[in-house]
Amino acid sequence: MKYILEEVRRQEEKEKIPVVRMEIDYELLTLYDALQEQDSVQIIKSKERLKQLRMKLLELQKK
């Protein structure tokens, strides 16, 4: 039973990877727009969010 639960958890984590990649893509678009508009506040927010998403993606890929 423990083995089955572990496999289900791994499968759920693998399904999250494409979602995180889509979030990264969206945030990159947001960053691009902020750079075009020279919106320094949004640039900082987007960079911080990208760092968080990167860490989340690396964590999911390790498992």
Image (cartoon, grey):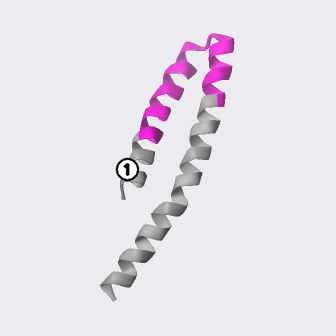
Instruction: Give, as a single range, the part of the protein colored magenta.
Output: 29-54
- The number of discs equals 1
User: Would you name the residue on which mark 1 appears?
Assistant: 59
Could you say where residue 16 lies in the image, as x and y percent from the top left? 52, 58
Quadrant position of the C terminus in the picture? bottom left
> Does the magenta portion include 3?
no
> Does the magenta portion include 37?
yes
The furthest residue to the front = 62
The amino acid type of the residue labelled 1 equals Glu
Quadrant position of the N terminus in the picture? bottom left
Instruction: Please name the predominant secondary structure of the magenta segment in the image.
Output: helix
Q: Looking at the image, which residue is at 55% across and 20% down?
A: 43
Q: Looking at the image, which residue is at 49% across and 61% down?
A: 14
The furthest residue to the top = 38
Mark 1, other Cα within 10 Å: few <14 / some 14–19 / many ≥20: few
In this rendering, the answer to whether 31 lies above or below 39 is: below
Could you say where residue 33 lies in the image, as x and y percent from the top left? 68, 21
In this rendering, the answer to whether 32 lies above or below 60 is: above
Which type of secondary structure does the marked residue at label 1 adopt? helix
